[in-house]
Image (spheres, grey):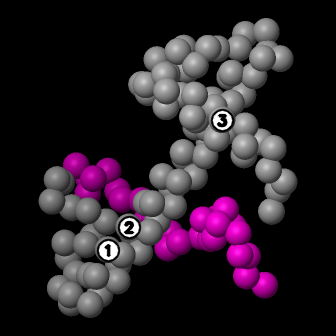
């Protein structure tokens, strides 16, 4: 059964990221072994898989940022932070911090899917 919601579609698992050994990571020309792929079809396919995987990871991280911002701004917390404080910690503008707090609150209110 396929999920039709946008949130459900973002949660699909893309190709796994393969972690590189530290010696490979220290080589600036080395990137997930893409430089060793000679077939352009295979290179396009693997690079596309990595693009989707990194985008999915960035999307998930953004949601977690928003959740944390909403929790930190919760007026029920005795140690709550202002949006200015959240913006300073995350290196955001205060306007963006406000938007992230609201996005996080929306995520917290949304039923689990």
Disc 3 + disc 1, Cβ < 8 Å:
no
Instruction: Tell me the CA gap for discs 2 and 3.
Output: 28 Å
Q: Main secondary structure of the magenta part?
A: loop
Viewer-proximal residue, 102 or 89? 102
Q: Which secondary structure, mark 1?
A: helix
Residue placed at 20% from the left, 87% from the top? 40
Disc 2 + disc 1, Cβ < 8 Å:
yes
Residue 69 magenta:
no
Few, some or many C-alpha atoms within 10 Å of disc 3 (few <14, some 14-19, many ≥20)? some
Region of the chain picked out in magenta, as a range: 1-26
Viewer-proximal residue, 35 or 91? 91
* Place of residue 72 in the rendered image (x, y in percent of width and height, measured from the top left): 68, 22
Residue to which mark 1 is pinned? 47
Q: Is residue 68 visible?
A: no
Residue placed at 78% from the left, 17% from the top? 75
Instruction: Tell me the CA gap for discs 3 and 1.
Output: 34 Å
Residue 47 shown left or right of residue 69 in the figure = left
Residue 110 shown left or right of residue 62 in the figure = right
Look at the image and tell me in which quarter the C terminus lies.
Answer: bottom right
Q: Decide which of tag 3 and tag 1 comes sooner along the chain.
A: 1
Residue to which mark 2 is pinned? 51
Residue 27 shown left or right of residue 42 in the figure = left
Residue to which mark 3 is pinned? 102
User: Is residue 93 placed above or below 50 in the rendered structure?
Assistant: above
Q: Decide which of tag 2 and tag 3 comes sooner along the chain.
A: 2
Look at the image and tell me in which quarter the N terminus lies.
Answer: bottom right
Q: Which secondary structure, mark 3?
A: helix
């Amino acid at each position: 059964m396929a999920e039709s919601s946008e949130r459900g579609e973002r949660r699909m698992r893309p190709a796994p990221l393969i972690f590189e050994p530290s010696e490979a990571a220290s080589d600036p020309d080395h990137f997930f072994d893409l430089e060793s792929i000679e077939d352009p079809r295979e290179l396009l396919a693997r690079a596309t898989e990595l693009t989707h995987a990194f985008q999915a990871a960035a999307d998930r991280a953004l949601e977690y940022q928003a959740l944390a911002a909403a929790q930190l701004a919760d007026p029920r917390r005795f140690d709550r932070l202002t949006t200015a404080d959240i913006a300073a910690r995350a290196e955001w503008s205060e306007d963006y911090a406000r938007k992230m707090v609201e996005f996080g609150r929306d995520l917290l209110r949304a039923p689990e899917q």
